[in-house]
Structure formats: C-alpha cells, structure tokens
Image (cartoon, rainbow, N blue to C red):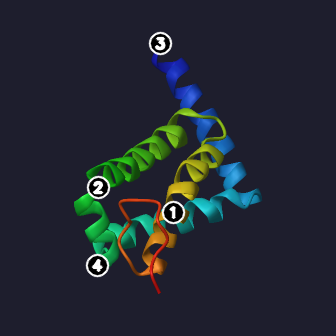
Amino acid sequence: DWEALRDLAARKAEMNLKLMRWTRWSSVFLVSLGLYASLALRPPAALAASFARRPGLAAACAGAAVGSVAALLANDSGIVAAATCLAYPGAALLALVLSGSPARESGAPREP
C-alpha cells in the first residue's frame, strides 16, 4: 500500500529532522561528510598512496559511506546511525592524513 509507505517515510523524515535540530549528531554527520567529500575530491599524497597499496581501505571507506546513507534512509533515528557510521572511519582517515605518511605494512613503529 503506497499510503502506508508514504506515512512511514514521513515519520522517518520527521524524526530525523527533530534529531538534527536537537542533537550533536547532525554536527558529527556534517563534519564527517565534509571530511569524506574533501578527501575523496582531493586526497593528500599519503592517503592516495595508502589507497593504492591497500584497496581494501578505500573499499571500507566507501562501504561506510553507503552504510551511512542506508542508515539515514532506513532508520527512524537515522542521523545518529549515519553519523556513527562515518565518524570512526573518518577519524581514522584524518589521523592517517595528519600523520603525513602512508599506512605501514607492519605494526612496527616509524623511524624518526
């Protein structure tokens, strides 16, 4: 029944808008989304090298982005789930970029 689907979508949108106005999760989501967009459009050399050597890293980030959109659309409190999906991989990417070096193959410490 299309009316039931429309009601469901309206309820989800209403709850997400309410949460976006009253919680910090909307800020986490927007910052993470901006980070993902900027790193995708102009990846720093360290990140591009890490993605080239580890295609799984790029796939994991893409999976987090897709999962975030799915959570946003399918969950009544989707903004919380979407922000959580992006926050942790976003923080890892940011740490990788700020370290200024590609991800290492082993767990050995970097030389100074």
Q: Are marks 1 and 4 in contact (CB under 8 Å)?
A: no
Alpha-carbon span between mark 4 and mark 2: 14 Å
- Three-letter amino acid code at the position of disc 4: Ala
Mark in the foreground, 2 or 1 = 2
Q: Amino acid at mark 1?
A: Ala
Residue 1's tag is: 3
Callout 3, which amino acid? Asp
Q: Secondary structure at mark 2?
A: loop
| Residue depicted at x 77% and y 58% | 22
Give the alpha-carbon distance from disc 1 to disc 4, as whole Å. 16 Å
* 72 is higher (above) or lower (below) than 103: above
Q: Residues within 10 Å of mark 2 (few under 14, many from 20)?
A: few
Circle nearer the N terminus (4, 2): 4
Left or right: where 75 falls relative to 64: right
Disc sitting over residue 92 in the figure:
1
SS type, badge 3: loop
The residue carrying mark 4 is 45
Left or right: 29 in relation to 46 = right
Q: Residues within 10 Å of mark 4 (few under 14, many from 20)?
A: few
